Amino acid sequence: MGEQGSELDIVHLLRRVTSEFGLRQAEFAARHGMHPTDVRALVCLLDAEREGRGVTAGRLGAELGLNSAGTTGLIDRLERLGHLARTRDERDRRRVLLRVTPQAVELGWAAFGPAIGSAVALLREFDAGEVAAVRRFLDGFLAAVSKVSADEEGGAGSDA
């Protein structure tokens, strides 16, 4: 491994964190009559809301990699469970936007709030430069993973 050892240790640690978090999400989904993809959908909608973006069914399906039928089933299921609501876009009444209900937010905070609180508390122990370094690494890693995914969709390596 040589010089890459410590860098790979961090990448492997990040993989363990994401794997562990994925397991917690799957357990949460099972406890509440959902599929893990349902939880991913709720996270996508919460992220969009935080960023001030409206999300249509088509956009959600694209973000989750689902076809139209799969997206419709997911939305219907989450709506039946009381976790999602459909609303008309105020700027374009023809568009139907999806939003997470307060009930779902409360349920999510009850399950994931302690871990989120621990992460925030840990980050508060870091100085501004350390927080900036963590952010730079995570932003860069996300961009790299997204690029690999986009390259695969674009047919990179398809000449095998």
Image (cartoon, helix red, strand yellow):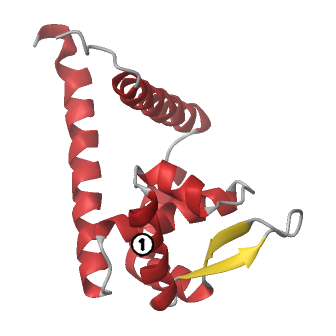
Residue that lies at the very extreme toward the left in this rendered image: 1
Front one among 151 and 7: 151
Q: In this view, does 89 lie above or below 28?
A: above
Q: Quadrant of the N terminus?
A: top left
Place of residue 125 in the rendered image (x, y in percent of width and height, measured from the top left): 49, 50
Amino acid carrying mark 1 in the image: Leu
Q: Is residue 68 above or below residue 139?
A: below
- Residue 141, quarter of picture: top left
Q: In which quarter of the image is the C terminus?
A: top left
Place of residue 23 in the rendered image (x, y in percent of width and height, measured from the top left): 22, 64
- Residue 57, quarter of picture: bottom right
Q: Residue at x 41, y 25 (%)?
A: 144
Q: Is residue 158 left or right of residue 142?
A: left
Front one among 28 and 40: 40
Q: Is residue 123 left or right of residue 26?
A: right
Front one among 107 and 57: 57
Q: Label 1 neighbourhood size at 10 Å, few (<14), some (14-19), many (20+)?
A: many
Q: How many labels does the image show?
A: 1
Q: Is residue 136 left or right of residue 155?
A: right
Name the residue beneath numbered marker 1. Answer: 74
Place of residue 108 in the rendered image (x, y in percent of width and height, measured from the top left): 46, 78
Q: Which residue is drawn at 38% across and 64% down?
A: 70
**Tag 1, which secondary structure?**
helix
Q: Is residue 132 above or below residue 79?
A: above
Q: Which residue is drawn at 20% across and 35% down?
A: 12
Place of residue 59 in the rendered image (x, y in percent of width and height, measured from the top left): 58, 53
Front one among 52 and 85: 85
Q: In this view, does 86 lie to the left or right of 105?
A: right
- Residue 155, quarter of picture: top left
Residue that lies at the very extreme toward the right in this rendered image: 91
Q: Is residue 97 above or below residue 109?
A: above
